[in-house]
Amino acid sequence: MAKQSWTSLALVGTCALAAWAMIAPAVAQERFPFEREMFLDAKRLADSKRVPMLEIFEDGRATIDLWCKSGEGRAEVTGDAIKFTLGPMREEYCTPERLQRDEELAAWLTAVTNWRLAEEDVLVLVGPTELNYRLSTH
């Protein structure tokens, strides 16, 4: 009976190690990409070379560039949860279309609740509208 108990215990231990080996790489890959420039995965507007950008620091500071406006904000990252708070934004001269896009993007960012990394270095911000940001390679 003792031999059977040790065999069962060894089998359980082996299964646990195998499960951890499969899960550990996924957990390691899910580290938030702090201090990396991220660009919204969107086509540039015809009248601009600008694409919205984010950079989030471990202390919660965030640099936020929308289609027209830029400013600082906060990004609280806990596990796979994230919450954005936009601070005062500097406004540049913009077309009414770009101002409207700024309002939409700001609302979408403040409604984000979670994040995940997708293939090809894409940060997916999950909320009522899913936003994809490409991690800068430089």
Image (tube, rainbow, N blue to C red):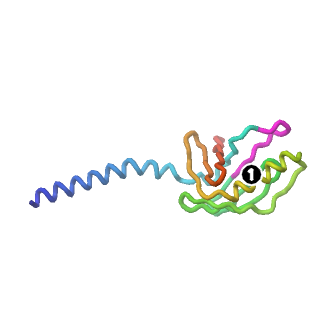
* Residue 71, quarter of picture: bottom right
Residue 74 place in picture, x, y as percent: 69, 62
Q: Residues within 10 Å of mark 1 (few under 14, many from 20)?
A: some
Of residue 6 and residue 136, the one placed in the foreground of this image is: 6
Please give the count of numbered marks on the rendered protein.
1
Of residue 100 and residue 125, the one placed in the foreground of this image is: 100
Chief secondary structure of the magenta portion: loop
Within the magenta stretch, is there residue 51?
yes
Q: Residue lying farthest front?
A: 128
Q: Is residue 83 above or below residue 136?
A: below
Of residue 50 and residue 132, the one placed in the foreground of this image is: 132
Residue 55 place in picture, x, y as percent: 68, 53
Q: Is residue 48 left or right of residue 2?
A: right
Q: Determine the residue positioned at 36% across, 52% down.
A: 20
Q: Is residue 136 above or below residue 71?
A: above
- Where the N terminus falls, by quadrant? bottom left
- Where the C terminus falls, by quadrant? top right
Residue 21 place in picture, x, y as percent: 36, 49
Within the magenta stretch, is there residue 6?
no
* Residue 82, quarter of picture: bottom right
Q: Is residue 31 left or right of residue 44?
A: left
Secondary structure under the numbered disc 1 in the rendered image: helix
Q: Determine the residue positioned at 31% across, 54% down.
A: 16
Q: What's the residue type where badge 1 is placed?
A: Leu
Residue 62 place in picture, x, y as percent: 70, 58
Q: Residue lying farthest left?
A: 1
Q: Residue lying farthest right?
A: 93
- Range covered by the magenta-colored residues: 44-54
Q: Determine the residue positioned at 84% across, 57% down.
A: 90
Task: Please name the residue that numbered disc 1 is placed on.
Answer: 105
